[in-house]
Every structure is written in C-alpha cells, then in structure tokens.
Image (tube, helix red, strand yellow):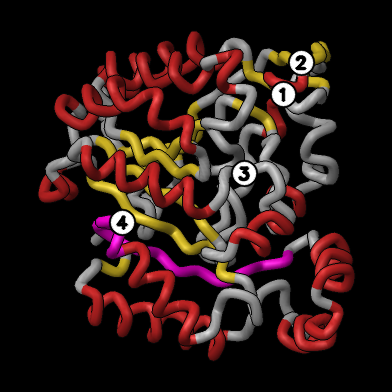
Amino acid sequence: MGNQSSARQRKCCDCANREKARKKPLSRREGGGIMVGEIFVKTILNKHRRRDSWFLDDYSLNPYQFCDFNCIYCYIRGSKYGGNMREGLAVKINAPTLLEKELLRRAKRKEYGFIALSSATEPWMHIEKKYELTRKCLKVIAKFKFPVHCLTKSTLILRDLDLLEEIDKNAILPSDLSKLKHGTLITFSLSTLEEKIAKIFEPSAPKPRERLEALQKVKNAGFHAGVAYIPVLPFLSDSDEQLEEMIRTAKEFNADYVFVGALTLHGINDLYYKVIEKHFPELLSKYKQLFKIFSQPGRDYQLRLEKKAKVFCEKYRVRYRIL
C-alpha cells in the first residue's frame, strides 16, 4: 500500500529475495503497455517481530514486486530498489506454492495471525487481472484458515469477495483478537477526496469515489471494513475542514473504522518536491519548512492530526482505528 507515517512504515522485506527477472510485455489493456518481469523468490511470507498495533497483522505477503498504480508518495520509492516503480514491476510466479509450504508449517505450530495483503505493493493492481496471483494466494490462505487484512486502493478486490467471505467465516483468530469476530478485514486507502489531486499523486489508481463505492459494496456484503487516510497530504488534504469531510464521508459509506496518518518523505524528497513545484508551486516553501529536519512532520503536527481525527470520529460515531 502507499505511504504511512514513519511508525507505520515497513521495509520491503522481500526485495532482497529478488531473482533475475524475465521480462514479458503486456498489452495496454492488461498492463498499460509496460514490461512486467516474472521472477521466482526464496520466501514469500514475512513474519513480523511483533504485531502491527494499527493493522493487527503478524505477517505480510506481497505477491508482486512494486506496483503499477505509481503513487508519488509511496514509501517503497525510498528503498534502494524503488527508484522506478514500473521498471522493476514483477510477478512472483511461485508465490502460491511457497505460501502453501510456509502456511502449512505455521498452521502445524498453530501460529495463526492476520496476514497483511499487502505491505509493499498493491495486491489488486491492474496486472492482477491477468495473473490472478493474489486470488491464488487467497485460496491458500483460506485452505489453512489464516485471517487476512486486505489493504488496497483497488476496486478489483470485489472479484474476490467469495474467497474473502470463506476466510471471514472460517479463519482461526489469535486468542487475544477473538473479539473481532471477523477473519477478514478490508481497508481502502485514500489520501484525498478530491479527484484532481488524487490524479496527480495516485495517477493509475481508481478514483477516490470508486474506492468509496467499493467500500460500500464490501460493507453490504457483511465485511468489517474501513478507510485509511494515509497519508493525508500537507496543505492539500490535512486542514480541519478536510479531515472532518473525510471522516464524515467514511461514515456515509458505512466504514467501521478510520485511520489517519501523516506523509513521510524518506528517500523521495526530490521526486515529491518536483511534483509540488509543478502543480502547487506556492506550497513548495511550506513543504520544505515542514520537512526541514526530518523526513516526516514534527511531533506537534502528528499529534494534531491524531487529536482532530479522534474528535471527528467521535462526532460521526465511527471508530478511530480497528481496536
């Protein structure tokens, strides 16, 4: 998924496992006319040292390398592997086979926990229509009854509600999360409600309205689902009025919960500033002041975001975070 506040960021743990890619062209309808590599990796399931306190996952799974949504703020761009997201785009062909072996081992040990799908890619990106790699992985997850937290910007997730429903009903939850009563969590990511701004920063992702409509369909199907406004964009989608509108809108589309997180620019300052200079030149000096020392806004800014988010969540009776 895209950028998160620094506390929420995860390293692309599987990047080090990249193998030499065999490039295959896709048609424009399938992959935007880009070249896609097919690679074999050594591992596919990443076990966290400790559970993610926001998204509740103990594991993460990334069936693809990089992402064709090409979001400007994506923190993976800041890794040594992420300079050109589309050039390095690749399909981990053996992901389902590896996942079956790894989940079999974990299931025998009863090491059940939520699997984040995904932490360093978009699992339902455009090329998923052709490869169906995420769907194949969901079949394995359902087989071994692990719970899953889907983190996405894509409406393609609606294709897989049958498998997600099976997981929701049958997954074995960790004992300390049994009160959730859901084996599937679905979180849609947005950085703004404004289509023009989203088009600049999330050029190949579905429109914000389309994501919200997908959320509504997910909720109508009985899933526990919400919205991650991560990252909100300084001076573009982070004012009190905008935050209130975002949380009110999440409630209108029946979100169970809302996340709000700040932008970080670790390793992507130059790229992000170029975009700001091109589209919002009057904001460039404000950005450089806000990110003057660190790759993230100061603590006061982040505390303000959290405080306002909690106030508006209480006002509109939507939970701030899942638990």
- Say which element carries label 4: loop
Q: Residue at x 59, y 32 (%)?
A: 125
Asked which quadrant contains residue 126, the reply is: top right
Give the residues drawn in magenta, as a range. 251-265
Type of amino acid at the residue the image marks with label 4 = Phe
Residue that numbered label 2 is attached to: 26
The residue pinned by badge 1 equals 31
- Contact flag, marks 2 and 1 (Cβ < 8 Å): yes
**Residue 255 painted magenta:** yes
User: Sequence order check: which comes first, mark 4 or mark 1?
Assistant: 1
Does residue 50 appear in this view? no
The residue at which mark 3 appears reads as 205
User: Where residue 242 appears, x then y in whole percent?
Assistant: 49, 79
Query: Which sits earlier in the primary sequence, circle 2 or circle 3?
Result: 2
Quadrant position of residue 94: top right
The amino acid pointed to by label 3 is Ala
Taking 295 as reference, is 321 above or below it?
A: above
Callout 4–callout 3 Cβ contact below 8 Å: no
Looking at the picture, how far across and down is residue 183, in whole percent?
22, 35
Query: Mark 3 falls on what kind of element?
Result: loop
Q: CA gap, disc 2 to disc 1?
A: 5 Å
Residue type highlighted by circle 2: Leu
| Badge 2 vs badge 3, beta-carbon distance below 8 Å | no
Q: Residue at x 39, y 85 (%)?
A: 308
Name the disc covering residue 253, or none. 4
